[in-house]
Amino acid sequence: MRITPDKMNKLDGRTCFICGKYLLNNTPDDLAYLKIHIGGTSRVKPDTYHLFSCPNCEKMAHKRCWYNVGERKRRKGFFGKEWQMVCPGCSHVLSSTRSERIDWNRGYEIPGHPDSELLELQVPEVMSWKAGSVFGKIGRAIDNFFQAVGLGSLSDPERGSIAKAAQKIGKTVQDVAERVFKLNIPVERRFEIRDLKCQNCGAPLPLPGEFEDAVVCAHCGTAHLL
């Protein structure tokens, strides 16, 4: 079932129970391929990816995550192998054993659950929805534009900005949590931000000054680069 932009709010803020990333985020590895048995490979156009929920525990994940983690390799005798789909969350068995697994880029489908039964997201529509959501209602959707990075990977200017932000709430850079969140939206639109919440604990964040590039959560010490 195709999820159109007017229905994407229902997925806003929800995460994949396997990889932990937002369901409305995707990577090139998630993109669906046409089922081709001979010759080369061909991706579905426009770029598309799918979501699937376990029929037993109802936990939802990217289809590619089911392929990567849910497909379990079983030994058959000394030299043989079989494949079986098992839910990583509740261990519910979703398929009988199979002698082989179709490669992802050959049009893989979850056994017993063809793509036509799955939630379908077209990437251009997701990007359009995100843009409208982040600039129209600064709320949970803006969280999709934060990227988690390690404190040690930051540049000296970024660390300096965090140190100044920490000082404003009575902390030092040594008090800042190791995981830092960087906001990735166009600079020219950041003036529209009126409210932000901590990506670690959910507490409200102080608004940065006009020329400040970072804020630190007073509750848990998590830094956010803006």
Image (tube, rainbow, N blue to C red):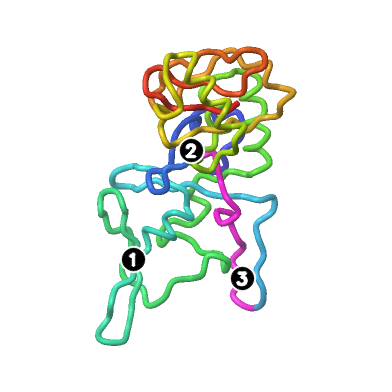
User: Is residue 81 placed above or below 140 in the rendered structure?
Assistant: below
Q: Is residue 189 magenta?
A: no
Distance (Cα) linking label 2 and label 1: 36 Å
> Would you call the spot at circle 1 few (<14 residues within 10 Å), some (14-19), or many (20 or more)?
some
| Main SS of residues in magenta | loop
In the image, the segment drawn in magenta is: 22-38
Which residue carries the number 1 mark?
72
Quadrant for the C terminus, please.
top right
User: Is residue 144 placed above or below 217 in the rendered structure?
Assistant: below
Which residue carries the number 3 mark?
36
User: Is residue 116 placed above or below 216 in the rendered structure?
Assistant: below
Distance (Cα) linking label 2 and label 3: 45 Å
Residue 108 got which mark?
A: none
Measuring 33% from the left and 70% from the top, which residue is drawn there?
73
Which residue carries the number 2 mark?
151
Q: Which kind of residue does numbered mark 2 sit on?
A: Leu
